[in-house]
Image (cartoon, grey):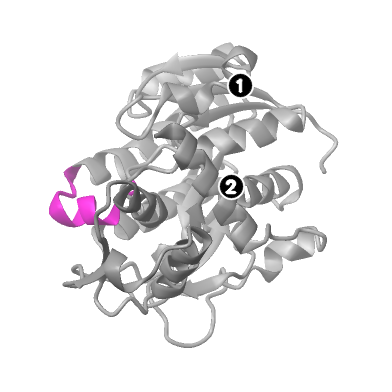
Amino acid sequence: MGDKLMNLMVTGCAGFIGSHAVEAFLRAGHTVVGVDKMTYAGKPENMKTFIDKILFYKADISDCAQMQKIISDHNIDWVVNFAAESHVDRSIDAADQFLHSNIGGVHSLLEACRKEGSRMFQISTDEVYGSTIDGSFIESDKLCPRNPYSATKAAAEHLVTSYYTTHGVEYKMVRMSNNFGPRQDKEKLIPKILKKLSDDQKIPIYGNGKNIRDWFYVEDCAKCILEVLDNGKPNEVYNLSLCNEKENLEVIRTILGLLDKNFDPNTEFVKDRLGHDFRYSIDASKLTSLNPLIKATNFKEALLKTIDYYEKEQ
């Protein structure tokens, strides 16, 4: 790990991935100032393990003046931006809020960083590359987003790099694969599966269920983000993945098996969603070159931890 302890402003700190990242940052000895608007994705209970260890502001990242004041007041080294609208289905139905948060909010943070001499750590997604049948994307590949959500994340990336080339605002950027684990919003696949089973309802399977995602346990992801924060090169992009590609059907069957439930009576195939990309796949060699000892939590073990969390939450 890097030997310099830093002052971090973590936006989206009450969200799914952001809250796990705050825990990792604090374990590493960094000082955290948390910012969250506390919409549907930001939950007070997500911060219960660390709320007494950070300074917290309920605020909107689009408020540039307030962001600048927080950065100035706390001598922030890095703004780590998890704050985003992230539900693909919602972006298809109504993209306005995605434009506001994922582009306008990032612009606000960049302006605050520019004025205060802070640096930007932007959290992005593997979805900016688009879908692929064969091979895996590397960081230098062309971006080809295929839904409104990923388009806003790609636009945010271009803003971040443009503020470096134009204004000298230093950055690091990560493109993460498909996170899962405790605290995830119930609209996502694994929490939705567990909720349907709890309510004795059928699990809906989009299309033929063969869409492939790279499943990334959130605690592993947080450790990888910390690795890039501490040891990654400035003004570079890193793919974050620990290589765990699985079809949605396989994920569903695995969860049903762990719960000793059969497939047929608990599932139903439904019409595929609009713009449903077939496969996301990224090459994370650049990440593992920073630390070859980074290892993924066993998938079934991670699922059991996730199941246990949601069973206790009900």
Of circles 2 and 1, the one toward us is 2
Badge 2 amino acid: Lys
Q: In the rendered image, is residue 108 in sight?
A: yes
- Residue at left offset 68%, top offset 33%: 25
Residue 153 lies, with reference to residue 102, above or below; the image says below
Q: Which residue is the extreme one toward the right?
A: 3
Q: Is residue 6 left or right of residue 206?
A: right
Mark 2 near mark 1, Cβ–Cβ under 8 Å?
no
Is 213 above or below relative to 62?
below
Horizontal placement of 69 versus 63: left or right?
right
Please tell me the numbered disc located at residue 42: none
| Percent position of residue 70, x then y | 50, 16
Q: Give the left or right position of residue 130, taking residue 16 as reference.
A: left
192 or 146, which lies in front? 192
Indicate whether residue 90 is drawn in magenta: yes
Position of the N terminus, as image quadrant, is: top right
Residue, far bottom: 134
Q: State the residue position of label 1.
A: 50
Quadrant that contains the C terminus: top left
Give the camera-side residue of 178 and 176: 178
- Which residue range is magenta in the image? 86-96
Is residue 29 shown above or below 138?
Answer: above
Per the image, the residue denoted by label 2 is 305
Residue placed most toward the observer, 190 or 293: 190
Q: Earlier in the sequence, mark 2 or mark 1?
A: 1
Q: Residue at x 20, y 68 (%)?
A: 273
**Principal SS element in the magenta part?**
helix
